[in-house]
Amino acid sequence: MLGTEALLDLTRTIAAALFAGKKYPWEILGDIGEFIRALGPTLPAGEFDHPKEDVWIARDAKVYPSAWIDGPCIIDHEAQVRHCAFIRGDAIAGRGSVVGNSTELKNSVLFDGVQVPHYNYIGDSILGYKAHMGAGSITSNIKSDKSLIAVMYGAERIDTGRKKFGAVLGDGVEVGCNSVLNPGTVIGRNTIVYPVSGVRGVIPENCIYKSAGDIAPRV
């Protein structure tokens, strides 16, 4: 379940080509900025504004005056970047996505329809189609001891070679308010995470995560 296509519908992102040939989705995290710089100039000038260097914003997107956007960045059609959002660069906000009030986004890809609408931190992460993070939920993208991050899948350890890696959320994942996704967390499609959860490791698809020892099938 850790493969890119097992977690993500690549027809639901402007960044599909970024994932080509990648076994695991987190392998794209070092390439986001370069990809944006290559894709941005090819976007239709009639559909995308280019307000500053390495920033492309769809003309039908809504960007609040108080938002701050650094490049490289692409804001796709009908996305919203709301009051006091802070986009630090190397970021793609997909079609119809929401980067909300006081949310911070860096080195991440939000697929179409993703919502991170209230006080979220999304760093070095990939959020699949229509994933949603409740108010105050965050991705923690660096370990306390600053060591390299591994994805723990049962007894298997998959070294990422990365010092910074937050989470991968499969399509349709719902994360409850004030939850923390620890470094290297991977959550399968359509899983629900209870509010105020501390999540680490790999969580299966189609489940309800109540706590580390209490994960139930979603029926």
Image (cartoon, rainbow, N blue to C red):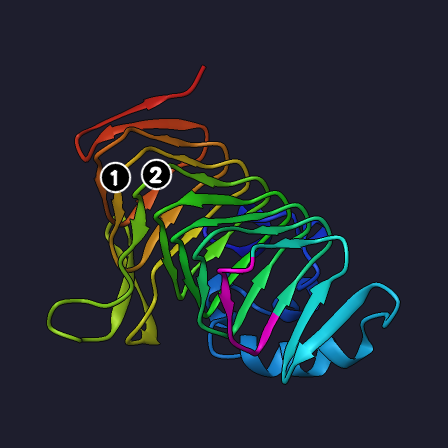
Instruction: Tell me the tag on residue 145.
Output: none
Q: Answer yes or no: do the residues labelled 2 and 1 have beta carbons within 8 Å?
A: yes
Q: Is residue 193 above or below residue 112?
A: above
Tag 1 secondary structure: loop
Tag 2 secondary structure: loop
Q: Position of residue 62 (x, y in %)?
A: 65, 52
Q: Position of residue 20 (x, y in %)?
A: 66, 68
State the CA–CA distance, disc 2 to disc 1. 6 Å
Q: In the figure, is residue 141 to the left or right of 17?
A: left
Q: Quadrant of residue 34?
A: bottom right
Q: Nearer the viewer, residue 186 or 90?
A: 90
Label 2 Cα neighbours within 10 Å, binned few <14 / some 14-19 / many ≥20: many
Q: Residue at x 42, y 60 (%)?
A: 125
Instruction: Tell me the tag on residue 135.
Output: 2
Label 1 Cα neighbours within 10 Å, binned few <14 / some 14-19 / many ≥20: some
Q: Residue at x 44, y 41 (%)?
A: 188
Q: Position of residue 165 (x, y in %)?
A: 34, 66
Q: Position of residue 130 (x, y in %)?
A: 57, 39
In the picture, the quarter occupied by the C terminus is: top left
Q: Which residue is tagged 1?
A: 178
Q: Residue furthest front?
A: 65
Q: Amino acid at mark 1?
A: Asn
Q: In the figure, is residue 97 to the left or right of 87?
A: right
Q: Amino acid at mark 2?
A: Ala
Q: What stretch of residues is rendered in magenta? A: 65-73
Total numbered circles = 2
The answer to if 197 sits in the magenta stretch is no
Q: Residue furthest left?
A: 145
